[in-house]
Image (cartoon, grey):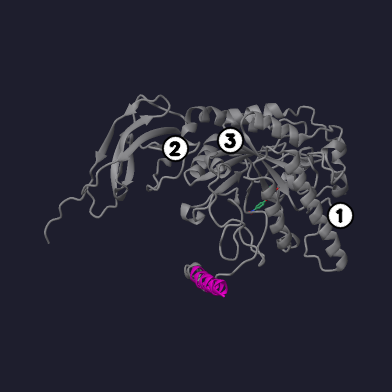
Amino acid sequence: MKRYLNSVFLLFLAVLFGNVVYGQEDAGKTADWKNLKYGPLHSERRADDAMEAFRDYGFGQFIHWGLYAIPGNEWEGVSARKGAAASEWIRAWSGPTKPVNWTQTYDNLYKQFNPVDFDAKRWARQAKAMGARYLIFTTKHHDGFALWPTQYSDYNSSNTPFKRDIVKEVVDAYTAEGIDVYLYFSVLDWHHPDYQSKNPATADEEKKFANFLNYTRNQLLELLHSYPQLKGFWFDGTWDPSWVNAYDFTYKLEKEMRNLHPGLIIGSRFRSDEYGKRHFDSNGQLLGDYEQGWERKLPADYSILKGNDWDAVMTIPPNGWGYMKDWTGLYTKTKDDLLAMLMRTVSMDGNFVLNFGPDGKGNMHPGEDKLAKEIGDWMHINSEAVYATHRVSWPTLPYGYLTRKGDYIYLTVFNRPINEQIRLLVPKVANERPQAAYLLVDGRELKLAHADIGLDRDANTYYDIQLPSDFQSNEPFVLKVKVGLVEAKEEKLMDAKK
Ligand code: JFZ
């Protein structure tokens, strides 16, 4: 009897406690907060080593390689560049410049795929010299062609004259160089007979699409199993209603992949919640480990990011990820464009990922080789301002971008002021002040002085760094500023009595 009463009492406590906890949990949420079944798999910000490594990369390389490398954005001399989406979309080009019977021709390109110059080690050495800390490599783009010998489709590299497992060679070569590998995978598949973009409506469509989902799962588990070194997936082609509506399947699949591969990193472009929301669920929570929507654009300001992890992927030409034979007449980003984007991204706690589209033989475009060398030479001197650095909550400056590691704040200068003085704006509340300034390139100490310009009610105080006139640079350079805590003291001028 006593035991029974005890249980009743415990039950009572549990209900009471449960209510309190539940009530508390609800309290911070708005009235329209939805109790989702298919929201994020982990609601806490990840703090494991794999995720911390992701946060520290700063700079990565993307490679788009596949059958589209053979035409290289043109077919029989005709480029659909005017109005074309992108070279890797050539199979889906439409309009007056669309090649005749293109779909059939394209789907036979695999018989010609023989990239005799392909050398994954050479690519990996180049990436390393450029300063990339991770790679995102296309395993299967929208055309459905797999660059590894998948058991689940014949449309793969082993059935080309080249025969080799390209994914394996790339994963091994980059891993050997100390570069982490992420695999790009397009769910959207123009080749698979069971793929459909619309939500299945008939029993037959249901059956076919279920078969397609199974094929996708098989390929993903196969990739995880075959290339255990991989750190994450970069998903794409997940916008069609058929996939969006498969939220129960994709939720379970994400769980399964994470269980099989602890530490796996998946961006926000994989699955949707039960209301069809992508990237962010119906409550605005990020779906995945980092925001994956920054594509050929950068956030205008930090607040837009809401503190989420993110990457930005960027092309060199305006809009082409796969190989483009002919860069003439296109604006291709310069070293300075790309360095400014890199530093802007890192200064907002993101990773900047630069895309390369090798040709049908396995060579990078000469323009890519040139930029890789230029960026690498710059990184060789200045990468301290990039790797494992994070955002500085000081006001932004017109000269360039701020990043921080430990007690050092880095200012990468793109705009050198005419008076040769770099004026830092330091929030008074921070209680942290610059103590010394150095030029990163040669380590020399620079003159640093507090500039007391005495503006009333100014939230910031000012520090000037004198740039030496004998230091001239034709590229962005880095100032390294040691900061330390100072005792809080009133920095306000005495006001006149009113
Ligand atoms: C996709 C692909 O279609 C494209 O070929 C390339 O692989 C790129 C990296 O990803 O294109 C997209 C996908 C998403 C957006 C824009 C282009 N988006 O969210 O703005």
Q: Which picture quadrant has residue 253?
A: bottom right
Image x and y of residue 423, in percent: 32, 40
Q: Is mark 2 on a helix, strand or loop?
A: loop
Q: Which amino acid does label 1 sit on?
A: Pro
The residue to which callout 2 is attached is 414
Q: Which of marks 3 and 1 is nearer the N terminus?
A: 3
Residue 442 inside the magenta-drawn segment? no
The residue to which callout 1 is attached is 193
Residue 21 inside the magenta-drawn segment? yes
In the image: residue 233, left or right of residue 490 = right
Dot 2: few (<14), some (14–19), or many (≥20) neighbours within 10 Å? some
As drawn, the residue found furthest toward the front would be: 1
- Figure check: 359 above or below 45: above
Q: Can residue 8 be seen in this view?
A: yes
Q: Earlier in the sequence, mark 2 or mark 3?
A: 3
Closer to us: mark 2 or mark 3?
3
Per the rendering, the mark at residue 201 is none
* Of residues 181 and 83, the one drawn nearer to the viewer in this rendering: 181
The residue to which callout 3 is attached is 133
